[in-house]
Image (cartoon, rainbow, N blue to C red):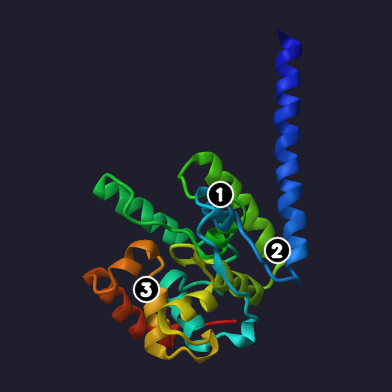
Amino acid sequence: MKAIIVRTLLILVSLFLLVQLWIFSSLVWWRTHPVETTMFMRLDYWADRSQPIQHEWRDYDQISDYFKHAIVAAEDGKFLQHHGFDWDGIQHAIERNGEKGQVVAGGSTISQQLAKNLFLYNKRSFLRKGQEAIATWMMERMWTKQRILEVYMNSVEFGENIYGVEAATQHYFGKSSHSLSREQAAFLAALLPNPKYYDENRNDRKLQYRKRMISKYMRYSHIP
């Protein structure tokens, strides 16, 4: 019995280390190469192979600065100040969720969201959050803030099988992400909490409110 327990533990530790090696090697490769596919993209594709993934990589300088300001204002106002984790934001989310008795707020930074998108899945669990923290820690030490934001803008979901700002701009406005206006950038950033729903409900009051708030605070957001 003891031998079985030891063997099982060795297998689990080996699997854990293999996962960390996979994440580490991926981050090394993606420091200088475009991210063409993420775990979220793969999961979407495997769920329905008849629907192609819409995704086009764009370098940092090819994306409108309006969108960079909008995405930071919407998702992570302290992006340049923290090292992957916004502890004040996490504490605030815990307090709000405790008051409501359910999960109504998250404290995830852009770095944490990117780690999840690249390597994990959307279902909440302690296992996923733990692995997300490890991947975030590695990413923040291996990549610059500009690279993190660049990959995030190119991999975040904006609708059904729509990933990255270029595919989103083509889908919603029929143009390149380089030429996004301030208002269009705020609209795309406002989609992110629930992009599939908002794609079908573009006049939703919450979406319009988020868009106004993002437009208001864009000027105060700092980008790499």
Q: Position of residue 50 (x, y in %)?
A: 52, 56
Residue type, mark 3 in image: Ala
Q: In the picture provided, is 136 more to the left or to the right than 203?
A: right
Discs 3, 2 touching: Cβ within 8 Å:
no
Which residue: 31% across, 74% down? 210
**Sequence-first tag of 1 and 3:** 1
Residue 88, quarter of picture = bottom left
Which mark, residue 213? none
Query: Could you say which is closer to the camera, residue 75 or residue 181?
Result: 181
Q: Secondary structure at mark 1?
A: helix
Which residue: 31% across, 67% down? 200
Residue 124 seen anywhere in this rendered image of the structure: yes
**Residue labelled with disc 1:** 46
Residue type, mark 1 in image: Trp
**Residue labelled with disc 3:** 190
Q: Nearer the viewer, mark 2 or mark 1?
A: 1
Image quarter where the N terminus lies is: top right
Query: Could you say which is closer to the camera, residue 63 or residue 27?
Result: 63
Q: Position of residue 99 (x, y in %)?
A: 25, 49
Residue 193 seen anywhere in this rendered image of the structure: no
Which residue: 29% across, 73% down? 202
Q: In the picture provided, is 128 more to the left or to the right than 91?
A: right
The answer for how far apart the CA atoms under marks 2 and 1 are is: 32 Å
**Residue labelled with disc 2:** 141
Q: Position of residue 198 (x, y in %)?
A: 33, 67
How crowded pointer 1 is (Cα within 10 Å; few <14, some 14-19, many 20+) is rated as: few
